[in-house]
Image (cartoon, grey):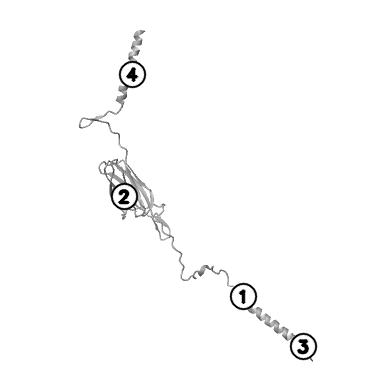
Amino acid sequence: MRLSRIIMALTIGLAVVAAPTAAGAAQPQPTPSPTGSLQPTPYPPQPPVLTVNPSTVNVGDTVTLTGAGFGPNEVVAITVTITPLAAGLPGGASARRSDGSTVAMAPVAFQAAAPTFFTVVTDSAGNFTTTYTPDTPGQYLFTAVGQTTGRTASATLTVLPRPQPSPSPTYHPTHKPWPPHGKLPVTGDNLGTPLAVGGGLVGVGVVLMLAGLAWRRRSRFGGSTR
């Protein structure tokens, strides 16, 4: 009985002593450096990220490009690829056929005045921020490549045509000028001619009626003297 208790106590003690050793073995072990000193094993770096804010603008508006996850103090080359707007998007290019119908134009590459290649330098944490001003409508693809680490990230931007101001109303030379001083134009038939004719007829009727009365009166008085 004592022997079994002694064996159990030794087993428990060995398990308690071995537990920290096993836990330490599970942790990442430092690796020796070229100089012989021990350094912790580095974790895999996070993938680089490139963002454009805002993601949809009009021609002439400035956007902000933000990069992260590149090497510290690294030169990052940014390439800009531009294609026309696809059919269905505001400002999308289209062509008109002879029968009046329209067809979307196929995207083709072209060169804009805004830079299509430039470089930036990251800070000590591998981040950078820069601005870009597009001057041509289209879909923009920004591709950033670290020149030392080779890390790559990309982002897209939609650039719409700048809205045109509403044209002021124009009048054809044959149209009558707009009434001055805010007067409303006269609409409907012109009543001046019928009123003038009616007034003349009434005047003629009054004259005839007076002439008839005078003739009757003269005839009556003239008949009594005979």
Q: Is residue 23 toward the left or the right of residue 222 in the image?
A: left
| Residue denoted by label 3 | 221
Residue 226 is marked as none
Marked residue nearer the N-terminal end (4 or 2) = 4
Q: CA distance from mark 1 to mark 2?
A: 78 Å
Q: CA distance from mark 4 to mark 3?
A: 161 Å
Q: CA distance from mark 2 to mark 3?
A: 117 Å
Mark 1 vs mark 2, foreground winner is: 1
Q: Is residue 79 visible?
A: yes
Where in the figure is residue 114, as x and y percent of width and height? Answer: 31, 54
Residue 80 is marked as 2
Residue located at (33% from left, 18% from top): 16
Marked residue nearer the N-terminal end (2 or 3) = 2
Q: CA distance from mark 4 to mark 2?
A: 62 Å
Residue located at (32% from left, 24% from top): 23
Q: Residues within 10 Å of mark 4 (few under 14, many from 20)?
A: few
Work out which residue is located at the far bottom of the displayed protein and give it. 226
| Residue denoted by label 1 | 195
Marked residue nearer the N-terminal end (1 or 3) = 1
Q: Residues within 10 Å of mark 1 (few under 14, many from 20)?
A: few
| Residue denoted by label 4 | 16
Amino acid beneath label 2: Val
The answer to whether 46 is drawn above or below residue 97 in the figure is above
Callouts 4 and 2 close, C-beta under 8 Å: no
The answer to whether 29 is drawn above or below residue 123 in the figure is above
The answer to whether 83 is drawn above or below residue 223 in the figure is above
